[in-house]
Image (spheres, coloured by chain):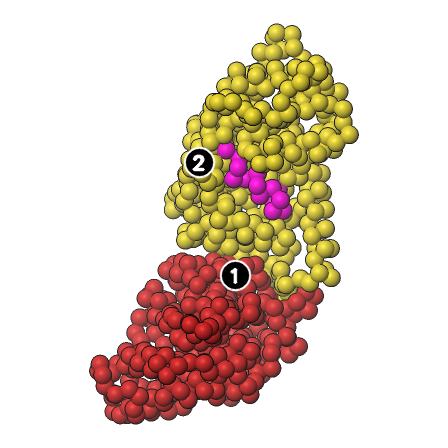
Chain colours: A yellow, B red
Amino acid sequence: MVVRTITGDAAVAYAAMLARAEVVPGFPITPQTVIIEQITEFINDGIMDADFIPAESEHSVMSVAVGASAGGVRTFTATSSQGLALMYEMLFAAAPSRLPVVMAVANRSLGAASGIWTEHNDSQPVRESGWLQVYVEDNQEALDMTIQAFRIAEDHRVMLPIMVCLDGFILSHVVEGVDIPEQSLVDSFLPKFVPVNVLDPKDPFMINPVTPPEFATEMRYQQDRAVEGSKLVIAEVDEQYAAVTGRRYGGLFEEYRMEDAEIALVGAGTWTGIAREAVDQLRAEGKKAGLIKLRFMRPFPGEELKRATAGLKGLGVFDRSAAFNGYGPVFTETRNALYGSSVPITDHVAGIGGRDITVDVVREMYDIVERNASGEKVRECTWHGLRGEQR
Amino acid sequence: MNRMSSMKDVPREDMLIHGHGACPGCGYAATAKNIAKMLGPNTVVYVPASCLVVFGALYPISSWKIPYFFTAFENTGAVTAGIKAALRRRGVDATVVGMAGDGGTFDIGLQALSGAAERNEDVIYVCLDNEAYMNTGIQRSSATPFGAWTTTTPVGQVVKGNRYFKKDIARIVADHNVPYVATLSVAHFTDFVRKVQKAKETKGFRFLHCLTPCIPGWRIEPSKGVSINRLAVDTGMWTLYEVVNGVPKVTYKPKTIVPVTEYLKLQGRFKHMSEEDILTLQGWLCEKWRAHYGEEPGSPPCPVPVHEEVLAHDGDPLYGI
């Protein structure tokens, strides 16, 4: 075990190397770029045995990735924001072709108001592309989940691509102490990739031919079942990873001080680090506050969240992007999952375009959740820190 | 495996077999089928959005006897590069071929094509050029010839047909300094066979640009595809050449430049063309002829027979095929 002080991007690159990714197409985009820079350094220094393919766009990056994965090798790439948007079409090729590509997404605001800072409006809109999605809280989790991602994606019960989402700059460019596991340990955890669908002249068959209505429904349904079925694999992999590294993340989500909680927030990303602090403060003040760190958006832990929140007096949902239906995407998913539950639920949008989320902002969220729980009329969706009047 | 140098050397076993859904007389299918059989069973084929993606395989039926993959329209250069990288890493020594249409090559796929060519990816890129987006219903591409009717260059009261000239894609690819670029026509079959053979035995990025008549899109008789291909070469609408490691060579030069009207009159897509437009096209063709065959400007006059002694056939045995 070696602890290095590295950025989140470097942690992801170490993970890709330790996972023995064999083909890595890449195209630069801030704040992901450091990942592919670091990987090319590993390759050129001779410590990583992989083909780096410098494609001429992100669309081609994902095209190379699906080609390589269909060719039967472990494939990794990374992107952000506009780059993910340019890949959009190919995301929908990777998932139904059941190609277990692993991709890091350094979350960054997409489109106008143009910026390079973190927001989840790049990865949230593609949660219906058929990819699995995990959001991480710190650099250690970025490394650990990138390694786990291969194991989850390549499991023959899953065979789906997966995005490891880490907040841009907050993780991608900030250094933390990260335990980098030994190669032998990763090798024992992560077996060699055994492809199911592979383009090989020795056993010719077709991947993703045009599929008429007579068959498309069944194919899509299998995809849907595979996403749902990945829940079991995610839990298993979390346990197995804990067995070799001692680090356990709780699978689909992690509960923090939820044992006797009355009010709680649920949300994904680095925000949870701030929220833990807010929970601790509230607990010190005698309030029964708890936190659910949402890790996976796909598979979305609907039933599991419904159970975990069943005894609450109030639940708030944190969203780092808008869905433009009056709420954020995490709220939309969560309220859907909690349909029939009596827990009052509110949405809390913050951190847009990379704006800092302070402990005070999170405490403001808990305050609204508490007031809502006590029957006071509050906004169903609050944009925190908004200048001007919220209408 | 023996080198193929003429029709009799072509393997009998098809890799794109009967039962596919192409139109009778389809030049696209004939070209794809012949290239596939010449590349043989140790081949992986990627097909982007095109007629071939529709007529070649429709789940659960496939006419392909080799591994087949499809994802999207614009990424033939990139997907084939990924497949090749994977096969290389797995120790599988197989040919990877992408078969794209003109839209998927000249237009939407140009960027990925350029990327793959620039990186000298070890793949064969076949452009099956039927001079429009035929699969979506005959819309104009940058491969569509001047004057041609398509559904997006309709014959209107004011504007009649395509107002742009065909892009010289093979030259653009050749300017990437790739090992092998060639233009092919099924009407010149020995030349066709030798070019596929050269592509097969060359390492690095190889580009085969094939003229493939489209029966409904060109509004031609199903039996006329090969004749029209031959006329395309005789009129200068198509030039047969190859570029080996940057050195261009014409592989077949017609004895005379045939007036373009001979080519146009067999095709409904040109039947509306005005005399002025035909002259414009003829002038463009003569310039192209002189450029491709290395003639002096203004010589020969347009369109007149060309003197044999100035031909750039360079002693090539294919001359006069």
- Up-down relation of residue A8 to residue A44 (above or below): above
Circles 1, 2 touching at the beta carbon (< 8 Å): no
User: Residue at image x 71%, y 60%?
Assistant: A213
- Up-down relation of residue B189 to residue A7 (above or below): below
User: Residue at image x 66%, y 35%?
Assistant: A333
Q: Where is mark 2, residue-wise?
A: A113
Label 2: element kind: loop
Query: In the image, B308: left or right of A364?
Result: left
Q: Which is more toward the observer, A109 or B47? A: A109
What is the CA distance from the residue labelled 1 to the residue labelled 2? 31 Å
Q: Quick check: do tags 1 and 2 share a chain?
A: no
Whether residue B101 is visible: no
Q: Which is more toward the observer, B307 or B11? A: B307
Whether residue A196 is visible: yes
Q: Is residue A127 magenta?
A: yes
Image location of residue A262, percent across then percent down: 70, 16
The amino acid sitting under disc 1 is Phe
- Up-down relation of residue B242 to residue A73 (above or below): below
Residue B297 is marked as none
Image location of residue A197, percent across then percent down: 63, 57
Q: Which residues are magenta?
A: A119-132
Pair 1/2: label in front: 2
User: Residue at image x 37%, y 79%?
Assistant: B277
The amino acid sitting under disc 2 is Ala
Image location of residue B168, percent across then percent down: 36, 71
Quarter of the rendering occupied by the C terminus of chain A: top right
Residue B73 is marked as 1
* Pointer 2 local density, CA inside 10 Å: few below 14, some 14–19, many at least 20: few
Query: In the image, A211: left or right of B130?
Result: right
Task: In the displayed orientation, state which residue is furthest to the front.
Answer: B157
